[in-house]
Image (spheres, helix red, strand yellow):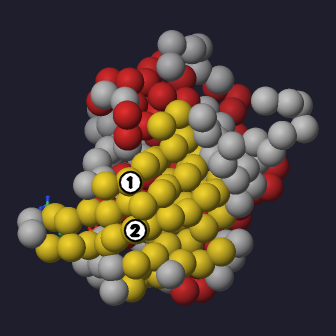
Amino acid sequence: MTSNAAPNPTLALAGVSKTLGGVKLFTDVNLQLHSGQSLAVVGESGSGKSTLLHIMAGLDQADTGEVLWADSAIHTLNTSQVAAKRLRHVGLVFQAYYLMPHLSAQQNIELPFLLAGEQPNTQRCLQLLEQVGMAHKAVSFPREMSGGEQQRVAIARALALNPPLILADEPTGNLDEDNAERVLQVLLQACSAQGCALVMVTHSLKAAGHLNKQLSLTEHRLV
Ligand SMILES: Nc1ncnc2c1ncn2[C@@H]1O[C@H](COP(=O)(O)OP(=O)(O)OP(=O)(O)O)[C@@H](O)[C@H]1O
C-alpha cells in the first residue's frame, strides 16, 4: 500500500446475516465505518440490534458474510485469536455492564491494561472516571453503585486503552438526561479527539441524533 492510500475502515461488514432459534433476524447487512465516524443503530425491541453488535464484536458468529476490523478478517479467525485482537481493537459497553464485582470502579477501569500486559495508566483511569462523573466513587465496588453508575464505569473501562472501535449497547439506557448527555459527549469526544469509530445501539432517537449516521434494523435489513 502506498502512503497516501485510503486507510481500511475500522469496521466493515459485508453480506452479514443471522438466524437465531429458527427466526431470521437480519440479512445482507453491509457497512463501513472509518476512524472518527459514529453510527447509531435503532430498531424495535427484538429486531436483533444486540446480536448485530455482538457479531461486530466477534462475540457471536454471522451465518454468512464477512466482518473486518481494519485489516483483520475476524470471521476467519478462531475464538482465541479474535479475543486477543479484541483486547486492543474494541472497547465494549454491554447492556448488562459486566463489571468485575470484586474490583473497585478504578480497578475495573485499570483491568484492560492488566489484560493487555501493561502497567495501568492511573492518570488516564482517574481522568476517565472524572469525565463520566464518577471520580467520587473511585474506590466503590459495583454492589455499592446504582445501575447508571455502573454503566458509566463500564463506559470508562471501554475507553481505557483508547481502542480504534467502540461498540456500545444502550450506553445511556439507565441514565438521567444530564448523565446521558455527559456520556454521549465522552463517547463523541473519543471519536473526534482520538479518532475512534463508534457504533451505538439505542432506543433513544435523541441520543441517536448526536451521531454522524443513523441506521435502523427494520424488516431484517439495516436501512
Ligand atoms: N441464544 C438465542 N437463541 C434464540 N433466540 C435468541 C437468542 N438470543 C437472542 N434471541 C432472540 O433474538 C432476537 C433478537 O435479540 P436481540 O437481543 O439481538 O434484540 P434487540 O434488538 O437488541 O432487542 P432489545 O432492543 O430488546 O435489546 C430476540 O427475539 C431474542 O429473543
The image position of residue 205, as x and y in percent, is 55, 86
Q: Quadrant of ligand 1?
A: bottom left
Q: Nearer the viewer, residue 9 or 101?
A: 9
Vertical order, 45 against 201 (above or below): below
Give the CA distance from mark 1 to mark 2.
8 Å
The image position of residue 152, as x and y in percent, is 51, 55
Q: Residue at x 40, y 78 (%)?
A: 221
Q: Residues within 10 Å of mark 2 (few under 14, many from 20)?
A: some
* Among numbered discs 1 and 2, the one appearing first in the sequence: 2
Quarter of image, res 140: top left
Residue 65: assigned label: 1
What's the amino acid at mark 1? Gly
Answer with left or right where residue 97 lies relative to residue 41: left
Q: Quadrant of the N terminus?
A: top right
The residue at the far left in this view is 21
Answer with left or right where residue 131 lies relative to residue 62: right
Query: In this rendering, does residue 178 appear at all?
Result: no
Answer with left or right where residue 116 lies relative to residue 183: left
Q: Residues within 10 Å of mark 1 (few under 14, many from 20)?
A: some
Is ligand 1 less than 8 Å from the beta carbon at label 2?
A: no
Residue 28: assigned label: 2
Q: Residue at x 65, y 74 (%)?
A: 213
Vertical order, 56 against 112 (above or below): below
Q: Residue at x 54, y 23 (%)?
A: 113
